[in-house]
Amino acid sequence: MALIRGRISLVVLLALATTACQTEDKAPQPRFVSSYDATGALSDGKSQQRNYGYFIEFRSRYALSYGHSYVIFGRTNKAGAMINPEVAGLAPATTDAGPYVMGHFLPVPAETGWSDGDLEEEYRSASWRVLLTEAEYQKVVADIRKLKAKSRLWHASLYNCNAFVAEIARSMGYETPGIWLRPQEFITKLREMNGG
């Protein structure tokens, strides 16, 4: 009986792992920019001029696998260019393919920072930049730092890069799509679900 349950569990895990691989990436999506105030999540209800100078960008990029989703956050200059951006994303804590493959069956150690290609425009597949005031930015960054501190394991089906980004989005009051989408589709649906 235990052997049968074990086999069924393995089949279920394999099915979940492969669901993320059922669609193909499309050409890079155009850039989209919104303001956090549009969601009402942190709106103070006052109709005043908002001073934006900060941002968070929900982003996906192409990779040899099915891609990667993550966030970039920081300050912007008057032209809207990033100034010393930070990256937060969840990925196996290695460049070796072995733990990445194992992470489709068992949780593997994770890292939550920058990975190769995150800031390179030619790898961007979808993005949604949300402009923030300084107060909004400070709250978002505090939430990201707490999440980074507690996120120590990666699993392709149970807690992947999309799940990590979804936690950040939910902390901002956004609705999130299912975590089993390809990253490009996940970021696109996240933006569409929240009027971005």
Image (cartoon, rainbow, N blue to C red):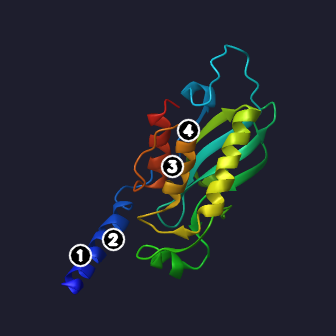
Q: Nearer the viewer, mark 4 or mark 3?
A: 3
Say which of 28 and 60 sits in front.
Answer: 60
Mark 1 to mark 4 CA distance (whole Å): 42 Å
Q: Are marks 3 and 1 in contact (CB under 8 Å)?
A: no
The amino acid sitting under disc 1 is: Ile
Whichever of callouts 3 and 1 sits on the residue coming sooner in the sequence is 1
Q: What is the x, y in percent for residue 177? A: 42, 45
Mark 2 to mark 3 CA distance (whole Å): 21 Å
Q: Are marks 2 and 4 in contact (CB under 8 Å)?
A: no
Question: Can you identify the residue that label 2 sits on?
Answer: 13
The amino acid sitting under disc 4 is: Pro
Q: What is the x, y in percent for residue 13? A: 33, 71
Q: Nearer the viewer, mark 2 or mark 4?
A: 2
Helix or strand or loop: what does disc 1 sit on? helix
The amino acid sitting under disc 2 is: Leu
Question: Can you identify the residue that label 1 sits on?
Answer: 8
**Residues packed near mark 4 inside 10 Å, few (<14), some (14 to 19) or many (20 plus):** few
The amino acid sitting under disc 3 is: Ala
Say which of 173 and 121 sits in front.
Answer: 173
* Quadrant location, the N terminus: bottom left
Give the quadrant of residue 63: bottom right
Helix or strand or loop: what does disc 4 sit on? loop
Whichever of callouts 4 and 3 sits on the residue coming sooner in the sequence is 4
Whichever of callouts 2 and 3 sits on the residue coming sooner in the sequence is 2
**Residue at left 63%, top 43%?**
57
Question: Can you identify the residue that label 4 sits on?
Answer: 30
Mark 3 to mark 1 CA distance (whole Å): 28 Å
* Viewer can see residue 184: yes
